[in-house]
């Protein structure tokens, strides 16, 4: 079955960097676009970024554009999110998710908590 | 960016009640609308895609309708496991956007 497992979260100081990983299994990873969605404590869902199946196209939310970079290694079935210049407001659980053109965001990981604090 | 507005933000209901949640888009999104259920401490679960299509394995007590700018999610007979927060989301254009959520409480 489809499985997405995020890792790499933790506590980081403002202005520093962190890299999240999302390990995928149970489906043909290289055929699927992948998304990042985050949720600040007690808040709603915020879409963060998407990366095309072949890495050719990326889109980002305005709130992270220029600071976050998503990438993938299809040989390792792994998606990455590089979080740079972190701010307090980036504190959130970060989910990776995937689906297809007709059933977007069908599968979700369990999430990885990033806490930005001095 | 397309803004998604849900109403109400929260509601209290009883087991067996019929519940309707509304989602309005700031511009037309055809039927590129999904609904998610989220329970505390858990990842969101996809319920409905294309405004009215039920995801595999989702009970038929959930239904969605609408097109253009106005959409609804209906739970026909609320059960204890349905108490959760529900989100709508548009996927017609990037950045994808979610509604602020509707918390369904006992």
Image (tube, coloured by chain):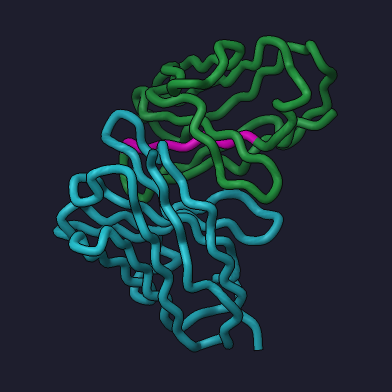
Chain colours: A cyan, B green
The residue positioned 40% from the left and 40% from the top of the image is A105
Q: Main secondary structure of the magenta part?
A: strand
Apparent side of residue B30 relative to residue A108 in the rendered image (left or right)? left
| Image quadrant occupied by the C terminus of chain B | top right
The residue positioned 52% from the left and 57% from the top of the image is A38
Q: State the image quarter where residue B93 is shown.
A: top left
Q: Magenta part of the protein: which range? A: B86-92
- The number of numbered discs placed on residues in the rendered structure image is 0
Q: Is A98 or A40 nearer to us in this picture?
A: A98
Vertical arrangement, residue A104 with respect to residue A86, above or below: above
- Image spot of residue B50 (x, y percent): 38, 23
- Image spot of residue A18 (x, y percent): 45, 80
- Image spot of residue A60 (x, y percent): 34, 60
- Image spot of residue A107 (x, y percent): 42, 41
The residue positioned 37% from the left and 68% from the top of the image is A81
Apparent side of residue B52 relative to residue A110 in the rendered image (left or right)? left
Q: Can residue A64 be seen in this view?
A: yes
Apparent side of residue B52 relative to residue A33 in the rendered image (left or right)? right
The residue positioned 74% from the left and 17% from the top of the image is B78
In magenta segment, residue A38: no
Q: Can residue B1 be seen in this view?
A: no
Q: Is B17 or A66 nearer to us in this picture?
A: B17
Vertical arrangement, residue A1 with respect to residue A8, above or below: above
């Amino acid at each position: 079955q489809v499985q997405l497992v995020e890792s790499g979260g933790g506590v980081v100081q403002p202005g520093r960097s962190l890299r999240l990983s999302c390990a995928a299994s149970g489906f043909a990873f290289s055929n699927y676009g992948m998304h990042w969605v985050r949720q600040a404590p007690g808040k709603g869902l915020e879409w963060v970024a998407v990366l095309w199946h072949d890495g050719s196209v990326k889109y980002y939310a305005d709130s992270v554009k220029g600071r976050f970079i998503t990438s993938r290694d299809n040989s390792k079935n792994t998606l990455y999110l590089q979080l740079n210049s972190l701010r307090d407001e980036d504190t959130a659980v970060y989910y990776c998710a995937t689906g297809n053109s007709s059933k977007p965001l069908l599968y979700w990981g369990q999430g990885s908590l990033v806490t930005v604090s001095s | 960016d397309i803004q998604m507005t849900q109403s109400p933000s929260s509601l209290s209901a009883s087991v067996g009640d019929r519940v309707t949640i509304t989602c309005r888009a700031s511009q037309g999104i055809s039927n590129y609308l999904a609904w998610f259920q989220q329970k505390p401490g858990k990842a969101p679960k996809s319920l409905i895609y294309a405004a009215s299509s039920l995801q595999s394995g989702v009970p038929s007590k959930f239904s969605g309708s609408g097109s253009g700018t106005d959409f609804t999610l209906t739970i026909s007979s609320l059960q204890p496991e349905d108490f959760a927060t529900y989100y709508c989301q548009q996927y017609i254009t990037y950045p994808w956007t979610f509604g602020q959520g509707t918390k369904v409480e006992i």
